[in-house]
Image (cartoon, grey):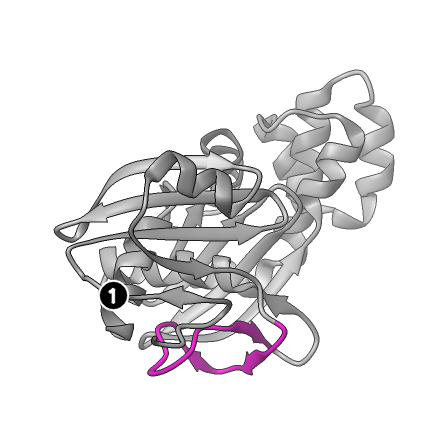
Amino acid sequence: MIDAMPRRTYLRGMSDWIGIIEDHTGVRGWGFRDGRAVSTANGLNTEAILAQLGEADVLIVAPTREAAKLPAKLLPDAGFTDLTDGKSRLPAPLRLQLVGFQQDHPNWDGVALLLTATHSYWCLISAGELVGFQPFMTPRLMTALHVPAQAHPQATAETLSRPERLAAHLAQAETDPQAMTGHLIGAELGAARAWWLGQQVAVIGPTELATSYAAGLTAQGVPTTCHDDPSPQGMIALHAALT
């Protein structure tokens, strides 16, 4: 048995295997063969995933009690844990997204913006390491206010230039949900200016929300691209590193 961290790994034959991500949003899994994902599944727990994907060697990635301090390699020599800057944590499943993005874009330096259902994470990558990151709770605020992922570009620009006016802007836009989304994203972009100024940014997350963030950044002249979840590529790289 090889201890892959963060939870348990059962590695026997290497021809067929299953990769599973466990986090607070649920459980996702992929069946892999010949270096690519050939099947996928979603469920409430690991047992449900295995029931869909069948029996095979299993690699599980989940948030960990331990956390490696920054700066840290995205793909470590041993173990796979959360990362910390001493104040906040980047959970192992999100670290896996960065690993997958790096596999698709080798030698890429810049800022990867990871979007989840509750947080956004601005992650500074250099020479294959995570140098620093900054989380925001904007997606959770969007959920609390029942606003959509689509943002009004003018509202984004307005609050980006005056983030201290966020509360007033939200009150003025109370009947326009897309404008409220724009104001929330604009406030975050204003607060995160030090993270994107002079950088290229890769936005990774749900299409509509990623597009809203990317539009705000592009309007500021920031080279910005949007990407689907690279977790399967990250799982393949982690599996190869541990076997």
Q: Left of 106 or right of it: where is 43?
A: right
- Numbered range of the magenta stretch: 65-84
Figure check: 13 above or below 4:
above
- Where residue 150 sits: x, y (%)? 57, 26
- Where residue 91 sits: x, y (%)? 56, 63
Helix, strand or loop for disc 1: loop
Residue 192 appears in the figure: yes
Of residue 151 and residue 117, the one placed in the foreground of this image is 117
Task: Give the residue furthest to the left.
Answer: 34
- Residue drawn where x is 57% and y is 57% of the image: 121
Figure check: 87 above or below 15:
below
Which residue is disc 1 drawn over? 12
Q: Left of 170 or right of it: where is 67?
A: left
Of residue 211 and residue 144, the one placed in the foreground of this image is 144
Mark 1 crowd level (few <14, some 14–19, many ≥20, 10 Å Cα): some
- Residue drawn where x is 29% and y is 51% of the image: 56
State the quadrant of the N terminus.
bottom left
Of residue 85 and residue 178, the one placed in the foreground of this image is 85
Residue 74 is covered by the magenta coloring: yes
Label 1 sits on what residue type?
Answer: Arg
- Where residue 76 sits: x, y (%)? 37, 79
Q: Characterize the magenta stretch by its predominant secondary structure.
A: loop
- Residue drawn where x is 56% and y is 68% of the image: 133
Residue 215 appears in the figure: no
Figure check: 217 above or below 76:
above
Query: Residue 87 appears in which quarter of the rendering?
Result: bottom right
Query: Residue 200 appears in which quarter of the rendering?
Result: bottom left
- Residue drawn where x is 53% and y is 40% of the image: 213
